[in-house]
Image (cartoon, helix red, strand yellow):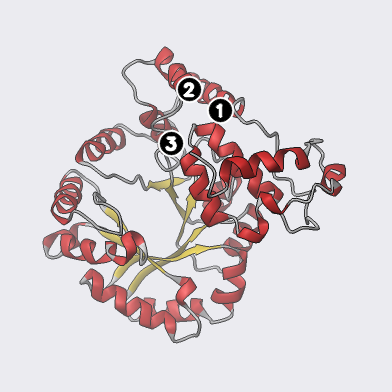
Amino acid sequence: MPGGPGGNIDEQEATRMIRHAIDHGVNYIDTAWGYHDGNSEIVVGKVLKGQYRQKVRLATKSPVWEIHGPEDFDKLLNTQLSKLQTDHIDFYLLHAIGADRWKDTILKHDVLGSAEKAIRDGRIGHLGFSFHDDYNAFETIVNGYDKWTFCQIQYNYMDTENQAGTKGLELAASRGLAVIVMEPLLGGRLATPPESIRQIFTQEDKTRTPADWALQWLWSQPEVAMLLSGMSNMEQVEQNLVSADKSRVRAFSADEQKVIERVQEAYRSRIPIPCTKCGYCMPCSNNVDIPGNFEIFNYASLHDDIAGAKNRYKWAIKPEHRADKCAACQECEDKCPQKIAISDWMPKVDALLAESAPV
């Protein structure tokens, strides 16, 4: 949504954008408890009030980190219904679950049982989950409950092996789940690639944007049911409407796929540390998250985005697991199949990503 810092939303422009999108065929509106510091559901409720609520399928997410007992699920859901000014949520997701939240919250507090009651009384139409963990955790969650309707995963042409990845997409589809894709443009990074990447696209088609390449690559895959592309201005709304309108399943040609493969290879050539996240280096005797540190360092180079990498480092890697805790013992280097000089790289990671490091 359009807005500024601190969760502020330009309600007038948000209303104009969302209703314009609905008027031109968009029929799935996604929000969540924590978006825009809790303001997103309130604004969406205002925007959809009246006839627009009947034109869309509304999705929001249970903040499972706020569930500390069986009674919390209903309290949160009822608050969300009030904020959204509706008596039912068409598609309700358990938000950002992985192996730990699945075990320590969903199963421990019988969240699935509470959700089934909400389905029976009409407050929820369909139950799903959004996911941030590795493939093994995804498989456990998909196979751990036989009444999922849908799931939401991060997926794009650079995330085919990250998190659930292509393997997870295919697993979910094979189980009959509709798959909603988030981060189709990797937080906008694939829409504004480095110049060397952009040139690969323009050599093929000077009129087509990198964003459209990324979106059409996804739309073409039959396992993908829906894309969630964040939009902060009307121009982006219009561009997404045009891209969606011309999308078709299996429409991406073999030649177009070759372009994407060249782009993928060009991106990979920008990765300085050849870490495959195999995990053989773990656990570290000093508790350093070696693959996690390397992944964010590589991200900075991959997308020419040091500021974004520093922000990821701040929220994704706990202080006790960061690169500055490396003692250069070199125990991990004997285990690394890629023979990476891990103890040499860690000071470089810290120098680039530490909060005090210059951007």
- Asked if residue 201 is positioned above or below residue 356 in the image, the reply reads above
Amino acid on which disc 3 is placed = Arg
Q: Is residue 102 left or right of residue 155?
A: right
Q: Quadrant of residue 227?
A: top left
Residue named by callout 2 = 197
Amino acid on which disc 1 is placed = Tyr
Q: CA distance from mark 1 to mark 3?
A: 12 Å
Q: Earlier in the sequence, mark 2 or mark 3?
A: 3
Q: Earlier in the sequence, mark 1 or mark 3?
A: 3
Dot 1, how many residues are within 10 Å of its Cα: few (below 14), some (14-19), or many (20+)?
Answer: some
Q: Which residue corresponds to the image point at 45% horizontal and 81% vertical from the top-left?
A: 114
- Asked if residue 75 is positioned above or below residue 159 in the image, the reply reads below
Dot 2, how many residues are within 10 Å of its Cα: few (below 14), some (14-19), or many (20+)?
Answer: some
Secondary structure under tag 2 reads helix
Q: Are marks 1 and 2 in contact (CB under 8 Å)?
A: yes
- Asked if residue 123 is positioned above or below residue 266 in the image, the reply reads below
Residue named by callout 1 = 267
Q: Which residue corresponds to the image point at 54% horizontal and 43% vertical from the top-left?
A: 357
Q: Are marks 1 and 3 in contact (CB under 8 Å)?
A: no
